[in-house]
Amino acid sequence: MPRPLLLLLLFLPALPVLADTPPAYNRVTLSENASTEVHNDQMVAVLFSQYEGHDATRLAAQVNRDISEAIGVAKKTPGIEVSTQSYRTSPIYDKRRIKGWRVFQSIRLKSTDSGRLGKLLGDLQKRLKLQSLGYQVSPAQRRRHLDGLIRTAVDRFSRRAQMIAESLGRKHWRLVRLSINDGGSRPVPVMRAGMMADMAMEKAAPVSIEAGTARLDVSVNGEIELSD
């Protein structure tokens, strides 16, 4: 059997299925959203240890010692969540020749008790440096608000869909596609590099900063089909 004819026969069974697919008419794409301001109730801090020199093995041991001691202290403090972050060893060049090594590792601390975490940061800066400090909405706080926002956004979507149907002289509509985006949560930085340097000079001083608020947004996007 000739090859072109064979290919044609292979595709023939799929033709009735394509023919049975109803055309999509009277479809409208729309979106709605809901938002609210929520108190930032979780402090997030990143601290790091870094050394430079010629012996990469010795530098790694120093970094590991600092990080291990900091994790041990943090785990003994109630209400503090600690996790290790990036670890890297990178060469230091001088005119394309390696003249030394830089070893770096950081840890992330999170807590809804900002006073306790602030005091811990003052203690840990005896060995570590503060890379960033910010606030965010805790997962528990976020969950408490998202359900209500989703209900509000979906209700607005439904009412707008009904309004569109009536405006176009249609009695009914059905949902074809719907997606819900509740965004994400990332720490809001509240300290500049200069402020971190000042904190390093007063290692024992507790950190006291304002948490502020964050905006939670939920968007609903979808497609509806109108009918008589």
Image (cartoon, rainbow, N blue to C red):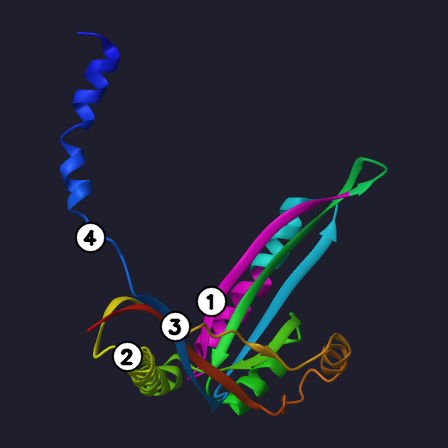
Q: Is residue 179 visible?
A: no
Residue type (three-letter) at the residue carrying disc 4: Pro
Q: CA distance from mark 2 to mark 1?
A: 58 Å
First in residue order: circle 3 vs circle 4: 4
Q: CA distance from mark 3 to mark 2?
A: 18 Å
Q: CA distance from mark 4 to mark 2?
A: 22 Å
Q: CA distance from mark 1 to mark 4?
A: 54 Å
Query: What residue does disc 3 label?
Result: 30
Name the residue nearer the viewer: 36 or 126: 36
Q: Is residue 76 shown in magenta?
A: yes
Query: What residue does disc 4 label?
Result: 22
* SS at mark 4 in the image: loop
Q: Position of residue 143 (x, y in %)?
A: 34, 82
Instruction: Look at the numbered discs 4 and 2 and tell me whether their residues touch, using CB distance below 8 Å.
Output: no
Query: What residue does disc 2 label?
Result: 169
Q: Is residue 198 left or right of residue 130?
A: right
Instruction: Look at the numbered discs 2 and 1 and tell me whether their residues touch, using CB distance below 8 Å.
Output: no
Q: Position of residue 90 (x, y in %)?
A: 67, 46
Q: Give above or below for 112 relative to 100.
A: below
Q: Is residue 20 left or right of residue 76?
A: left
